[in-house]
Image (cartoon, helix red, strand yellow):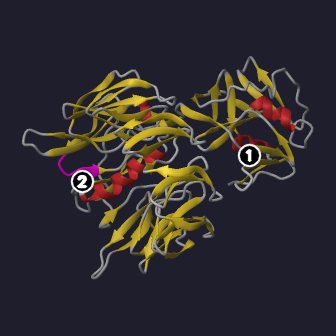
Amino acid sequence: MRKLVGFILVFTLVFSMMAVTNANEASGSGSVPQPDYLPYVEVGVLSEGLAFYMEAGEETDSFGFIDTSGKIVIKARFEAAGIFHDGLAPVRIDGLWGYVDKTGQFAVPPIYTGVGRVFEEGFAQVVKDDKWGYVDKTGKEVIAFDYEDTNPFNNGLAPVKKNEKYGYINKEGKEVVPFRYEAATVFSEGRAMVKIKDKWGVIDQNGIEIEKPKFEEAFPYSRGLAAVKHEGKWGYIDLSGREVIQAHYDEARPFQEGDLAPVQVDGKWGYVNKEDTMIIRPQFMDVYTVFSEGLALVSIENEDDYEMLGYIDQRGKVVVPYSYDLMGSSFSGGLATVADGGQGSFYFMRNPLNVQTQEPQPQSALPSASKVMINGREVSPEAYNIGGNNFFKLRDLAMLLNGTNKGFEVGWDQDAKVIRLTTSKAYTEVGGELAATGQLSVKQAAPAAAKLLVNSEEARFTAYTLDGNNYFKLRDLAQALDFNVSWDAASNALTIDTKSGYQPE
């Protein structure tokens, strides 16, 4: 059953490093349902509602995709397949790689000898003539094949290797951070780990050194902290490079859902919080997945020295019992791909915690470096990028759109405790709109519980609180108020067009 480890865990852990997302509230320990085995030789990780499946052939195996019910949606005809992300998945046919959409049609033709894992920020890595470059979701080759190695884009930048050194390029392919590093990670929360003379340090998105290279090993930032190894022991540093959890662990991994991090003491793994309090005592042989939707896959060693795997909750309680044959992925959308040595081996396990809601967790907010244009006019609001999306103060946006055909009034209903937005109505200033504090920096943004009504109809918005102000996701506002938002990578400009209706990304 350990054959799953290579695929499931690599993808699960990589994606959780890229974006450790929503935690969930459990309504109880629940119960583990009987498996409904899938009639396939192998099944991959569910992502965006689909997972690859494998059919065994007389000469070669073939791969296709199934949905959460196990129904085939793309017939097995590929030699290899990855997971869906941003609506596309990598597949190989006749020895060459491309990307297919959810109907099985090629969006990026199979003409490449290698590809990256997934699309990120609209770009994917591909190999041609032993060199790496990038394509967009239409298959257009957008960055030249000049590199020995590439990585996904994050916040508009990607680490790439040229002439045996790593640097960072933007989406135009222009060098932003010089090629001077032995190794480099993608940016996470406005910071990247870079290696010089066999030691890791920290830089910001301008290439400015935040912490000099002194660590033997390092993980990218997650939830405001990064796990680093210094003088043989692991600890954690904050976004300024300051040590906040002393290096005293044998091993450590990034913080994840529930603000818990796996750490190893005397050969056993447990979990600590950001105050370095041991929440789950060290007792596990290994930790296989991050916490996701309240559960993590861990292992113990029984009295006969055999490894047994099971799922625990964030208090350390065993929710899915330990088993010799169990292997699985993180939970996503209430499901995990699991193999347990049964009839068909593979099945989709429903989260036994009976997760009902998904609540946003605190995230790092990066000052937006994008130019903002409204109907062709440049404006300068203080905005943040959170999780790859732009967030504006509500009253700043109301002030900027005042006098346009998408203007709106903002009011507070004290009795109902809701914010009311009224369209086609002039905005009334309250003071402080568009005020420039000049103090923008990387900060932790807490989820905001603000409730909004648009013309008396409740609307869903993603919002975070920063320095006492509520920042709302621009695209949520654009959809609710029906104006268009677009992004131009060449000019690094975010454009708001009130003369056009909302268009999804």
Viewer can see residue 29: no
Callout 2: SS: loop
User: For mark 1, what is the residue?
Assistant: 479
**Looking at the rendered structure, which numbered label has been put on residue 340?**
2
From the top left corner, tell me how far across and down residue 319 is, in percent: 29, 37
Residue at (46, 35) in percent of width and height? 212
Viewer can see residue 169: yes
Sequence order check, earlier mark of 1 and 2: 2
The disc labelled 2 sits on which kind of residue? Asp
The disc labelled 1 sits on which kind of residue? Gln
Secondary structure that dominates the magenta span:
loop
Q: Quadrant of residue 248?
A: top left
Left or right of 431? Residue 284 is left
**Looking at the rendered structure, which numbered label has been put on residue 270?**
none
Q: Which residues are magenta?
A: 323-327
- Is residue 176 placed above or below 191 in the rendered structure? below
Q: Quadrant of residue 416?
A: top right
